[in-house]
Amino acid sequence: MPCPNEIMSIPLKLQEIVDDFAGLSREEKIETLIAYAESLPPLPARFAEERAKMEPIPECMTPVFLFGEKQADGGIIFHFDIPPQSPTVQGLANILATGLNGCTPQEILAVPPDFYHTMNLQEAITQQRINGFMGVLAHMKQTAVNLMDK
Amino acid sequence: MSYAHPEYLVETEWVANHLTDPTIRIIESDEDALLYAMGHIEGAVQVDWFSTLQHPLRRDFMTREQFEEMCSKFGITNNTIVIFYGDKSNWFACYALWLFQYYGHNNVKIMNGGRIKWEQEKRPLVKDVPSYARTTYRAKEADKSIRAFRDDIFQQIEKKKPMVDVRSPKEYTGEMLHMPNYPQEGATRGGHIPGAVSIPWSQAVNEADATFKTPEELAALYKGKNIKADGEIIAYCRIGERSSLTWFVLKYLLGYPNVKNYDGSWTEWGNLVDAPIEK
Protein backbone atom coordinates (compact mmCIF):
# COMPACT_ATOMS: atom_id res chain seq x y z
CA MET A 1 0.00 0.00 0.00
CA PRO A 2 1.43 3.38 -0.93
CA CYS A 3 2.17 5.82 1.82
CA PRO A 4 -0.34 8.73 1.62
CA ASN A 5 2.55 11.12 1.10
CA GLU A 6 3.34 9.49 -2.20
CA ILE A 7 -0.08 10.00 -3.70
CA MET A 8 -0.68 13.43 -2.21
CA SER A 9 1.06 16.51 -3.54
CA ILE A 10 0.89 20.27 -3.08
CA PRO A 11 0.52 22.44 -6.20
CA LEU A 12 3.52 24.68 -6.80
CA LYS A 13 1.79 28.00 -6.10
CA LEU A 14 0.41 26.80 -2.77
CA GLN A 15 3.79 25.30 -1.86
CA GLU A 16 5.40 28.70 -2.49
CA ILE A 17 2.98 30.39 -0.09
CA VAL A 18 3.60 27.70 2.53
CA ASP A 19 7.37 28.12 2.20
CA ASP A 20 7.14 31.92 2.34
CA PHE A 21 5.19 31.77 5.61
CA ALA A 22 7.64 29.38 7.24
CA GLY A 23 10.40 32.01 7.23
CA LEU A 24 8.35 34.93 8.57
CA SER A 25 8.49 36.33 12.10
CA ARG A 26 5.35 36.22 14.24
CA GLU A 27 4.51 39.86 13.43
CA GLU A 28 5.12 39.32 9.72
CA LYS A 29 2.86 36.27 9.75
CA ILE A 30 0.04 38.30 11.30
CA GLU A 31 0.58 41.14 8.80
CA THR A 32 0.63 38.70 5.87
CA LEU A 33 -2.50 36.92 7.05
CA ILE A 34 -4.27 40.29 7.42
CA ALA A 35 -3.12 41.24 3.90
CA TYR A 36 -4.65 38.01 2.57
CA ALA A 37 -7.87 38.71 4.51
CA GLU A 38 -8.10 42.28 3.23
CA SER A 39 -7.42 41.28 -0.37
CA LEU A 40 -10.06 38.53 -0.50
CA PRO A 41 -12.17 39.66 -3.46
CA PRO A 42 -15.88 40.17 -2.80
CA LEU A 43 -18.22 37.53 -4.16
CA PRO A 44 -18.95 38.37 -7.83
CA ALA A 45 -22.50 39.64 -8.33
CA ARG A 46 -23.37 36.74 -10.65
CA PHE A 47 -23.46 34.42 -7.61
CA ALA A 48 -25.93 36.57 -5.65
CA GLU A 49 -28.99 34.53 -6.54
CA GLU A 50 -27.37 31.20 -5.71
CA ARG A 51 -25.91 32.67 -2.50
CA ALA A 52 -29.33 33.83 -1.32
CA LYS A 53 -30.61 30.25 -1.51
CA MET A 54 -27.87 28.82 0.71
CA GLU A 55 -28.55 28.25 4.37
CA PRO A 56 -26.26 29.95 6.86
CA ILE A 57 -24.46 27.64 9.25
CA PRO A 58 -26.02 28.12 12.66
CA GLU A 59 -24.52 29.47 15.88
CA CYS A 60 -20.88 30.37 16.34
CA MET A 61 -19.52 29.03 13.11
CA THR A 62 -18.13 31.53 10.69
CA PRO A 63 -20.40 31.19 7.66
CA VAL A 64 -18.16 30.23 4.75
CA PHE A 65 -19.91 30.33 1.40
CA LEU A 66 -17.87 29.17 -1.54
CA PHE A 67 -18.49 28.72 -5.22
CA GLY A 68 -16.36 26.97 -7.82
CA GLU A 69 -16.32 27.62 -11.55
CA LYS A 70 -14.76 25.25 -14.02
CA GLN A 71 -12.74 26.97 -16.74
CA ALA A 72 -12.43 25.80 -20.35
CA ASP A 73 -9.05 24.23 -19.57
CA GLY A 74 -10.52 22.17 -16.74
CA GLY A 75 -9.09 24.31 -13.94
CA ILE A 76 -11.34 25.55 -11.13
CA ILE A 77 -11.63 29.15 -9.89
CA PHE A 78 -12.99 29.58 -6.35
CA HIS A 79 -15.01 32.55 -5.05
CA PHE A 80 -15.77 33.16 -1.38
CA ASP A 81 -18.24 35.05 0.76
CA ILE A 82 -16.96 35.32 4.34
CA PRO A 83 -17.91 38.10 6.79
CA PRO A 84 -15.24 40.72 7.58
CA GLN A 85 -15.73 39.99 11.30
CA SER A 86 -13.80 36.76 10.70
CA PRO A 87 -10.48 37.91 9.20
CA THR A 88 -8.64 34.71 10.13
CA VAL A 89 -11.04 32.61 8.07
CA GLN A 90 -10.96 35.18 5.25
CA GLY A 91 -7.15 35.05 5.23
CA LEU A 92 -6.98 31.24 5.29
CA ALA A 93 -9.55 31.04 2.47
CA ASN A 94 -7.66 33.54 0.34
CA ILE A 95 -4.40 31.64 0.80
CA LEU A 96 -6.14 28.51 -0.47
CA ALA A 97 -7.80 30.37 -3.35
CA THR A 98 -4.51 32.00 -4.35
CA GLY A 99 -2.67 28.70 -4.11
CA LEU A 100 -5.25 26.53 -5.84
CA ASN A 101 -7.14 28.68 -8.35
CA GLY A 102 -6.70 27.20 -11.80
CA CYS A 103 -5.89 23.72 -10.49
CA THR A 104 -7.81 20.71 -11.78
CA PRO A 105 -10.15 18.77 -9.48
CA GLN A 106 -7.56 15.98 -9.33
CA GLU A 107 -4.86 18.40 -8.20
CA ILE A 108 -7.17 19.89 -5.56
CA LEU A 109 -8.11 16.44 -4.24
CA ALA A 110 -4.42 15.55 -3.96
CA VAL A 111 -3.66 18.38 -1.48
CA PRO A 112 -2.80 16.73 1.85
CA PRO A 113 -5.08 17.98 4.67
CA ASP A 114 -2.02 18.80 6.78
CA PHE A 115 -0.33 20.87 4.03
CA TYR A 116 -0.13 23.91 6.33
CA HIS A 117 1.85 22.31 9.16
CA THR A 118 5.17 23.67 7.95
CA MET A 119 3.81 27.26 7.82
CA ASN A 120 4.34 27.50 11.61
CA LEU A 121 1.18 29.55 11.94
CA GLN A 122 0.68 28.48 15.54
CA GLU A 123 3.12 31.20 16.64
CA ALA A 124 0.73 33.78 15.24
CA ILE A 125 -2.78 32.38 15.68
CA THR A 126 -4.54 29.84 17.86
CA GLN A 127 -4.24 26.23 16.72
CA GLN A 128 -8.00 25.84 16.83
CA ARG A 129 -8.40 28.59 14.27
CA ILE A 130 -5.63 27.26 12.04
CA ASN A 131 -7.70 24.10 11.86
CA GLY A 132 -10.16 26.22 9.89
CA PHE A 133 -7.83 25.46 6.99
CA MET A 134 -8.98 21.86 7.11
CA GLY A 135 -12.62 22.89 6.98
CA VAL A 136 -12.18 25.28 4.06
CA LEU A 137 -10.01 22.78 2.16
CA ALA A 138 -12.57 20.00 2.71
CA HIS A 139 -15.26 22.35 1.39
CA MET A 140 -13.13 23.11 -1.71
CA LYS A 141 -12.49 19.43 -2.31
CA GLN A 142 -16.23 18.70 -2.16
CA THR A 143 -16.82 21.49 -4.69
CA ALA A 144 -14.08 20.03 -6.90
CA VAL A 145 -15.75 16.59 -6.77
CA ASN A 146 -19.08 18.13 -7.73
CA LEU A 147 -17.49 19.87 -10.72
CA MET A 148 -15.45 16.91 -11.86
CA ASP A 149 -17.87 15.59 -14.47
CA LYS A 150 -19.35 18.91 -15.51
CA MET B 1 -36.77 47.46 36.56
CA SER B 2 -33.03 47.90 36.14
CA TYR B 3 -30.13 45.49 35.98
CA ALA B 4 -29.27 44.15 39.43
CA HIS B 5 -25.62 45.29 39.21
CA PRO B 6 -25.42 47.92 36.48
CA GLU B 7 -21.90 48.80 37.63
CA TYR B 8 -20.64 45.72 35.77
CA LEU B 9 -21.76 47.18 32.47
CA VAL B 10 -20.45 50.23 30.64
CA GLU B 11 -21.64 51.82 27.42
CA THR B 12 -19.51 52.56 24.35
CA GLU B 13 -20.06 56.29 24.85
CA TRP B 14 -18.53 56.16 28.33
CA VAL B 15 -15.50 54.21 27.07
CA ALA B 16 -15.02 56.69 24.21
CA ASN B 17 -14.89 59.49 26.78
CA HIS B 18 -12.43 57.71 29.10
CA LEU B 19 -9.76 56.47 26.68
CA THR B 20 -6.96 58.24 28.56
CA ASP B 21 -8.39 57.68 32.05
CA PRO B 22 -5.43 56.29 34.07
CA THR B 23 -7.75 54.42 36.46
CA ILE B 24 -9.00 52.08 33.74
CA ARG B 25 -7.48 49.45 31.45
CA ILE B 26 -9.34 48.28 28.36
CA ILE B 27 -8.87 44.65 27.27
CA GLU B 28 -9.96 43.21 23.93
CA SER B 29 -10.77 39.50 23.99
CA ASP B 30 -11.92 38.03 20.67
CA GLU B 31 -12.78 34.73 19.12
CA ASP B 32 -10.83 35.88 16.04
CA ALA B 33 -7.54 37.20 17.40
CA LEU B 34 -6.58 38.93 14.12
CA LEU B 35 -9.24 41.57 14.74
CA TYR B 36 -7.10 43.28 17.39
CA ALA B 37 -4.16 43.59 14.99
CA MET B 38 -6.45 45.06 12.32
CA GLY B 39 -7.66 47.76 14.68
CA HIS B 40 -8.68 48.15 18.32
CA ILE B 41 -9.88 50.78 20.76
CA GLU B 42 -7.09 53.23 21.52
CA GLY B 43 -5.11 52.10 24.55
CA ALA B 44 -6.62 48.59 24.62
CA VAL B 45 -4.41 45.56 25.24
CA GLN B 46 -5.21 42.08 23.93
CA VAL B 47 -5.74 38.72 25.55
CA ASP B 48 -6.36 35.60 23.50
CA TRP B 49 -8.69 33.06 25.09
CA PHE B 50 -6.38 30.24 24.14
CA SER B 51 -2.79 31.41 23.87
CA THR B 52 -3.03 33.92 26.76
CA LEU B 53 -5.65 32.64 29.18
CA GLN B 54 -5.14 28.88 28.98
CA HIS B 55 -2.40 26.91 30.67
CA PRO B 56 0.20 26.00 28.04
CA LEU B 57 0.28 22.33 29.07
CA ARG B 58 -2.66 21.22 31.20
CA ARG B 59 -6.29 21.61 30.26
CA ASP B 60 -6.80 24.48 32.68
CA PHE B 61 -6.49 28.23 32.93
CA MET B 62 -3.27 30.12 33.42
CA THR B 63 -1.90 29.75 36.94
CA ARG B 64 -2.24 32.47 39.56
CA GLU B 65 1.43 33.38 38.99
CA GLN B 66 0.91 33.62 35.22
CA PHE B 67 -2.16 35.77 35.82
CA GLU B 68 -0.15 38.08 38.07
CA GLU B 69 2.57 38.35 35.42
CA MET B 70 0.02 39.18 32.71
CA CYS B 71 -1.64 41.90 34.81
CA SER B 72 1.73 43.36 35.83
CA LYS B 73 2.79 43.51 32.18
CA PHE B 74 -0.44 45.31 31.28
CA GLY B 75 0.18 47.88 34.02
CA ILE B 76 -2.91 46.76 35.93
CA THR B 77 -2.98 47.38 39.68
CA ASN B 78 -5.36 45.78 42.13
CA ASN B 79 -7.45 48.98 41.94
CA THR B 80 -7.60 49.32 38.15
CA ILE B 81 -11.07 49.22 36.59
CA VAL B 82 -10.72 46.60 33.84
CA ILE B 83 -13.13 46.94 30.93
CA PHE B 84 -13.59 44.03 28.53
CA TYR B 85 -14.93 44.05 24.99
CA GLY B 86 -14.72 41.72 22.02
CA ASP B 87 -16.29 40.22 18.92
CA LYS B 88 -19.21 37.77 18.68
CA SER B 89 -21.50 39.53 21.20
CA ASN B 90 -18.75 39.67 23.84
CA TRP B 91 -18.45 35.88 24.37
CA PHE B 92 -14.77 35.93 24.98
CA ALA B 93 -14.94 39.27 26.75
CA CYS B 94 -17.22 37.59 29.31
CA TYR B 95 -14.86 34.61 29.44
CA ALA B 96 -11.90 36.90 30.25
CA LEU B 97 -13.97 38.82 32.82
CA TRP B 98 -14.91 35.53 34.47
CA LEU B 99 -11.23 34.57 34.72
CA PHE B 100 -10.37 37.95 36.28
CA GLN B 101 -13.13 37.33 38.82
CA TYR B 102 -11.75 33.84 39.40
CA TYR B 103 -8.43 35.36 40.47
CA GLY B 104 -10.15 37.95 42.62
CA HIS B 105 -10.16 41.08 40.45
CA ASN B 106 -13.64 42.37 41.17
CA ASN B 107 -13.37 45.79 39.54
CA VAL B 108 -14.46 44.65 36.07
CA LYS B 109 -16.98 45.73 33.44
CA ILE B 110 -18.24 44.59 30.05
CA MET B 111 -18.58 47.19 27.31
CA ASN B 112 -22.19 46.67 26.20
CA GLY B 113 -22.36 45.69 22.52
CA GLY B 114 -18.63 45.02 22.23
CA ARG B 115 -16.80 45.46 18.93
CA ILE B 116 -20.00 45.17 16.91
CA LYS B 117 -21.63 48.24 18.47
CA TRP B 118 -18.38 50.24 18.57
CA GLU B 119 -17.93 49.64 14.82
CA GLN B 120 -21.59 50.34 14.07
CA GLU B 121 -21.19 53.72 15.75
CA LYS B 122 -18.17 54.34 13.51
CA ARG B 123 -15.92 54.99 16.48
CA PRO B 124 -12.19 55.00 15.78
CA LEU B 125 -9.96 51.92 15.90
CA VAL B 126 -6.17 52.18 15.97
CA LYS B 127 -3.32 49.77 15.20
CA ASP B 128 -0.79 51.05 17.74
CA VAL B 129 -0.14 48.48 20.44
CA PRO B 130 0.21 50.40 23.73
CA SER B 131 2.73 49.66 26.43
CA TYR B 132 2.28 50.52 30.08
CA ALA B 133 4.60 50.97 33.02
CA ARG B 134 4.93 47.64 34.75
CA THR B 135 3.09 47.10 38.02
CA THR B 136 3.37 44.44 40.70
CA TYR B 137 0.01 42.75 40.64
CA ARG B 138 -1.05 40.37 43.41
CA ALA B 139 -3.87 37.96 42.62
CA LYS B 140 -6.09 36.32 45.21
CA GLU B 141 -6.69 32.61 45.74
CA ALA B 142 -8.82 31.20 42.93
CA ASP B 143 -12.53 31.74 43.68
CA LYS B 144 -13.95 28.25 43.17
CA SER B 145 -17.47 29.51 43.96
CA ILE B 146 -17.87 30.65 40.34
CA ARG B 147 -16.35 27.57 38.69
CA ALA B 148 -17.89 24.11 38.48
CA PHE B 149 -15.86 20.93 38.00
CA ARG B 150 -17.16 17.55 36.83
CA ASP B 151 -17.71 16.28 40.38
CA ASP B 152 -19.96 19.29 41.01
CA ILE B 153 -22.02 18.23 38.01
CA PHE B 154 -22.57 14.71 39.42
CA GLN B 155 -23.72 16.35 42.68
CA GLN B 156 -25.92 18.75 40.78
CA ILE B 157 -27.65 15.88 38.94
CA GLU B 158 -28.16 13.91 42.15
CA LYS B 159 -29.62 16.87 44.01
CA LYS B 160 -31.71 17.88 41.01
CA LYS B 161 -30.36 21.40 41.06
CA PRO B 162 -30.74 23.68 38.05
CA MET B 163 -28.40 23.64 35.07
CA VAL B 164 -28.53 25.73 31.92
CA ASP B 165 -27.29 24.35 28.62
CA VAL B 166 -26.60 27.46 26.54
CA ARG B 167 -25.60 25.71 23.30
CA SER B 168 -27.67 25.75 20.14
CA PRO B 169 -30.81 23.55 20.12
CA LYS B 170 -29.19 20.94 17.87
CA GLU B 171 -26.24 20.53 20.21
CA TYR B 172 -28.66 20.15 23.13
CA THR B 173 -30.64 17.40 21.41
CA GLY B 174 -27.46 15.66 20.31
CA GLU B 175 -28.12 15.98 16.58
CA MET B 176 -24.86 17.88 16.29
CA LEU B 177 -21.73 16.65 18.07
CA HIS B 178 -19.61 19.72 17.47
CA MET B 179 -19.53 22.79 15.32
CA PRO B 180 -18.66 21.91 11.73
CA ASN B 181 -14.92 22.60 11.24
CA TYR B 182 -14.24 22.61 14.99
CA PRO B 183 -13.50 18.89 15.42
CA GLN B 184 -11.05 19.46 18.28
CA GLU B 185 -13.85 20.90 20.34
CA GLY B 186 -16.03 17.88 19.75
CA ALA B 187 -17.19 15.00 21.90
CA THR B 188 -17.71 11.32 21.31
CA ARG B 189 -21.31 11.48 22.59
CA GLY B 190 -24.09 13.94 21.85
CA GLY B 191 -26.92 15.17 24.06
CA HIS B 192 -27.03 17.13 27.30
CA ILE B 193 -26.47 16.74 31.03
CA PRO B 194 -29.56 15.17 32.65
CA GLY B 195 -31.81 17.83 34.11
CA ALA B 196 -30.25 20.74 32.21
CA VAL B 197 -32.68 23.10 30.49
CA SER B 198 -31.95 24.57 27.07
CA ILE B 199 -31.66 28.35 26.99
CA PRO B 200 -29.34 29.28 24.10
CA TRP B 201 -27.00 32.11 25.10
CA SER B 202 -28.01 34.17 22.08
CA GLN B 203 -31.46 34.76 23.56
CA ALA B 204 -29.83 37.09 26.11
CA VAL B 205 -28.47 39.53 23.53
CA ASN B 206 -29.97 41.72 20.84
CA GLU B 207 -28.92 40.46 17.45
CA ALA B 208 -28.81 43.95 15.92
CA ASP B 209 -26.10 45.51 18.09
CA ALA B 210 -24.93 42.72 20.44
CA THR B 211 -26.13 44.60 23.53
CA PHE B 212 -27.79 42.75 26.37
CA LYS B 213 -31.57 42.50 26.42
CA THR B 214 -33.57 44.56 28.91
CA PRO B 215 -33.86 43.45 32.55
CA GLU B 216 -37.53 42.58 31.95
CA GLU B 217 -36.72 40.43 28.92
CA LEU B 218 -33.89 38.65 30.73
CA ALA B 219 -35.99 37.99 33.84
CA ALA B 220 -38.80 36.55 31.72
CA LEU B 221 -36.38 34.41 29.69
CA TYR B 222 -34.76 32.62 32.63
CA LYS B 223 -37.68 32.54 35.07
CA GLY B 224 -39.80 31.13 32.25
CA LYS B 225 -37.49 28.09 32.24
CA ASN B 226 -37.48 27.84 36.03
CA ILE B 227 -33.99 29.33 36.42
CA LYS B 228 -34.58 31.50 39.49
CA ALA B 229 -32.58 33.68 41.84
CA ASP B 230 -32.70 31.25 44.77
CA GLY B 231 -31.23 28.36 42.76
CA GLU B 232 -27.67 27.09 42.80
CA ILE B 233 -27.18 27.29 39.09
CA ILE B 234 -24.52 25.87 36.76
CA ALA B 235 -24.20 27.02 33.15
CA TYR B 236 -22.28 25.16 30.47
CA CYS B 237 -21.76 25.09 26.71
CA ARG B 238 -19.04 23.41 24.60
CA ILE B 239 -15.82 24.87 26.00
CA GLY B 240 -17.19 27.32 28.58
CA GLU B 241 -17.05 30.50 26.54
CA ARG B 242 -20.69 30.98 25.55
CA SER B 243 -21.72 29.97 29.07
CA SER B 244 -19.49 32.73 30.50
CA LEU B 245 -21.87 35.16 28.85
CA THR B 246 -24.87 33.45 30.43
CA TRP B 247 -23.03 33.35 33.77
CA PHE B 248 -22.45 37.12 33.48
CA VAL B 249 -26.12 37.75 32.70
CA LEU B 250 -27.42 35.64 35.59
CA LYS B 251 -24.89 36.87 38.13
CA TYR B 252 -24.68 40.60 37.38
CA LEU B 253 -27.58 41.63 35.19
CA LEU B 254 -30.17 39.57 37.10
CA GLY B 255 -28.23 39.44 40.37
CA TYR B 256 -28.51 35.71 41.08
CA PRO B 257 -26.10 35.11 43.96
CA ASN B 258 -25.09 31.52 43.25
CA VAL B 259 -24.04 30.83 39.65
CA LYS B 260 -21.14 28.74 38.41
CA ASN B 261 -19.64 28.29 34.97
CA TYR B 262 -18.69 24.71 34.07
CA ASP B 263 -15.77 25.37 31.75
CA GLY B 264 -15.12 21.66 31.15
CA SER B 265 -18.51 21.81 29.45
CA TRP B 266 -19.56 19.39 26.74
CA THR B 267 -16.03 18.68 25.51
CA GLU B 268 -15.46 17.12 28.93
CA TRP B 269 -18.89 15.70 29.76
CA GLY B 270 -19.50 14.25 26.29
CA ASN B 271 -16.17 12.39 26.51
CA LEU B 272 -16.35 11.33 30.16
CA VAL B 273 -16.65 7.59 30.73
CA ASP B 274 -19.70 6.61 32.81
CA ALA B 275 -21.24 10.08 32.76
CA PRO B 276 -25.03 10.08 32.33
CA ILE B 277 -26.43 11.78 29.24
CA GLU B 278 -29.93 12.70 28.17
CA LYS B 279 -31.11 13.18 24.61
Image (cartoon, rainbow, N blue to C red):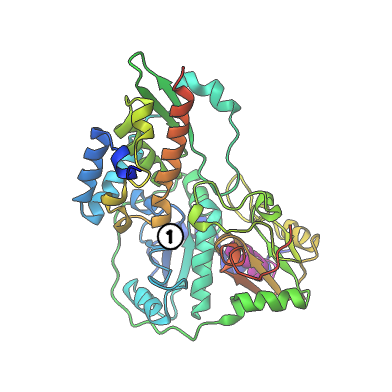
Query: Which quadrant holds residue B263?
Result: bottom right
Q: Main secondary structure of the magenta part?
A: helix
Query: Which quadrant holds residue A52?
Result: top right
Q: Which residue lies furthest to the top in this view?
A: A72
Residue toward you, B71 or B273: B273
Kindly tell me whether residue B115 is visible in this rendering.
yes
Residue toward you, B18 or B87: B87
Q: Does the magenta stretch include residue B2?
A: no
Q: Which residue lies furthest to the left in this view?
A: A23
> What span is in magenta?
B244-255
Residue B260, position as x, y percentages in the image: 63, 73
Q: Is residue B28 left or right of residue A95?
A: right
The chain carrying label 1 is B
Quadrant location, the N terminus of chain B: bottom right
Local crowd at mark 1 within 10 Å, few (<14), some, or many (≥20)? many
Q: Is residue B258 left or right of residue A72?
A: right
Residue toward you, B189 or A59: B189
Q: What residue type is labelled 1?
A: Glu
Q: Is residue B252 magenta?
A: yes
Quadrant location, the C terminus of chain B: bottom right
Q: Mark 1 points at which residue?
A: B28
